[in-house]
Image (cartoon, helix red, strand yellow):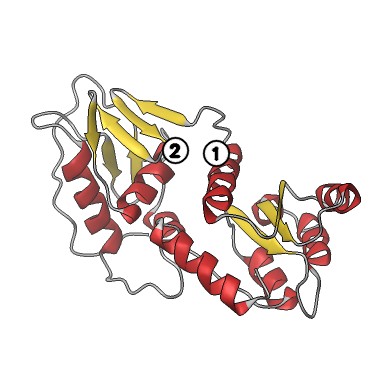
Amino acid sequence: MEDSPRLQRSLSLGLRREGYAVDVAGDGGEALWRATHHPYDVIILDIMLPALDGLSVLRKLRQTPGEVGTAHVLLLTAKDTVEDRVTGLRAGADDYLVKPFSFDELLARVEALIRRRHHAKNPVVSIGDLEIDTAARRVMRGGREIELAAREYALLQFLALRRGQVISRTEIESHLYDEQSERMSNVIDAAVYSLRKKIDLPGRPSLIQTRRGLGYVLQEPAADAQQPDNAPAAGRTS
C-alpha cells in the first residue's frame, strides 16, 4: 500500500519478478479493506497514505480478529527520527524502512518477515536431501543446484515453509497469483508438475505428494512410498 504511483509500480513490478503475488492499494481506505479481507503474508504499508494514514490503517488492522489481523507489516516512511520509529513499532509494525531505500534491502526484509510468519528462523529449509536457502533463493538437492523460475521457486518456498502440512489448491493459487495474473483452470496442477520435474530424482518418490481432494504436501516420503503419477490433472479440486 503506497501512495506514490511511481514507487507503487516499481515495487509491485519488482516483487512480481521475484515470484510474489502482489495486490496494490493507493489510499488508506482501500488498504484497510484489502488488509482486513485477505490473509497476506506481508503488508508493505506507507505511513503517508491519503484518506486514511498508514498508522491508522495499522492500528485498525491489529484490532481485527483472526489471521488477517496478525499479518506482518513493513512500514515505509520518509521520517527517520527515533520517535517516529518507536511510534510505528508501538502501533503494531513488525519492521520499519526509511525512504529512500534499495529494492534489495526491501526484498530481504520481506523474506525475513515471511520466515518469521512461518516460525522459521533458519533461512535454510531442509526436506531430506533437498535444501531451500530462502535468503540466497537457492535450491540444492544432493549437492546439485537446481535452477527454478521465479514462480516455481515461490511455490517451492511456500510448500517448504509449511512442510508436512496439506495445502489446498485454493491457498496455493491465492499465494502465487494476484489480480493481474491470467491463469487456466488447472494452473496449480501444472505448476506442481513442472516443479516436480525439476526437484525429483528418477526412480524415487516425489517430495511433493498429492492428497486427493485436499491439495499437496511437501515432505520426505516414507521408505515404502510408490512413485506417483506426476501428470497434471485436467481440472481443479478446491
Disc assigned to residue 236:
none
Q: 122 or 4, which lies in front? A: 4
Which secondary structure, mark 2?
Answer: loop
Answer left or right for 59 relative to 137: right
Q: Mark 2 or mark 1: which comes first in sequence?
A: 1
Q: Which residue is mark 2?
A: 134
Could you tell me the amino acid type at mark 1?
A: Arg
Residue 140 at x, y percent in the picture: 28, 31
Residue 72 at x, y percent in the picture: 66, 49
Q: Which residue is mark 1?
A: 115
Res 38 visible: yes
Total number of numbered labels?
2
Asked if disc 2 and disc 1 are in contact, CB closer than 8 Å, the reply is yes
Which secondary structure, mark 1?
Answer: helix
Residue 106 at x, y percent in the picture: 58, 52
Q: 148 or 194, which lies in front? A: 148
Answer left or right for 71 relative to 145: right
Could you tell me the amino acid type at mark 2?
A: Thr
Q: In which quadrant of the rendered image does the C terminus lie?
A: bottom left
